[in-house]
Amino acid sequence: MAVKSKVIADAGAIVGALSRSDQHFQRAAPLFRSITKPLYTCEPVISEALFLTRKVAGGQDIVLGLIESGALKIDFSLADHIPEIRSLMRKYSTTPMSLADACLVKMSELHDAAIFTFDSDFRIYRRFGRQRISLVGIDG
């Protein structure tokens, strides 16, 4: 069954969908195919995904190709949200929260969207300070 609402993609989910050797491949690949495109993301996530696919044959080209094809859409400007990102990273400093994770949480607030992830930290993070984030992958 296709996931049709707007979905934001985390690096681990992108890599999991592309790399057969990834621990999440069996779950991530069919979920990735079922989500209505585009999936939305941010540049810090793309940076992480490119780093994580550096040893996967053709992996970095595939990630960049997903952006070129429109399957992944970069839909966030860090410069426009520095105070909120700083606040999130301070709030979750003991987790700790990466820049990419903070951007995804902020994107979930801006777009009222689920996050496609296998990162359990997203069970801790909250939108607007108190709201649980809707998750695809790890929870759904």
Image (cartoon, rainbow, N blue to C red):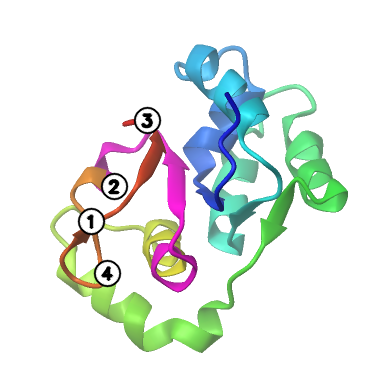
Q: CA distance from mark 3 to mark 2?
A: 13 Å
Q: Secondary structure at mark 2?
A: helix
Using the rendered image of the protein, determine whether residue 52 is visible from the camera's viewpoint. Answer: yes
In the drawing, what numbered circle is on residue 122? Answer: 2
Dot 3 or dot 4: first in sequence order is: 4
- Which residue was labeled with disc 4? 89
Name which residue lies at 43% across and 50% down.
Answer: 114
Q: CA distance from mark 4 to mark 1?
A: 10 Å
Give the crowd class for mark 2: few <14, some 14-19, many >=20 residues within 10 Å: some
Question: Horizontal placement of 115 versus 124: left or right?
Answer: right
- Which residue was labeled with disc 1? 125
Q: CA distance from mark 2 to mark 1?
A: 5 Å
Tell whether label 1 touches label 3 (CB within 8 Å).
no
- Nearest the viewer among 14 and 130 is 130
Question: Horizontal placement of 42 versus 108: left or right?
Answer: right
- Nearest the viewer among 130 and 62 is 130
Looking at the picture, how far across and down is residue 23, in whole percent? 45, 16
Q: Secondary structure at mark 1?
A: loop
Residue 36 vs 129, above or below: the answer is above
In the drawing, what numbered circle is on residue 50? Answer: none
Name which residue lies at 60% across and 19% down.
Answer: 30
Give the crowd class for mark 4: few <14, some 14-19, many >=20 residues within 10 Å: some
Tell whether label 4 touches label 3 (CB within 8 Å).
no
Residue 21 vs 127, above or below: the answer is above
Magenta residues (range): 108-122
Q: Secondary structure at mark 3?
A: loop
Q: CA distance from mark 3 to mark 4?
A: 26 Å
Dot 4 or dot 1: first in sequence order is: 4
Dot 4 or dot 2: first in sequence order is: 4
Name which residue lies at 29% across and 47% down.
Answer: 122
Q: CA distance from mark 4 to mark 2?
A: 13 Å
In the drawing, what numbered circle is on residue 140? Answer: 3
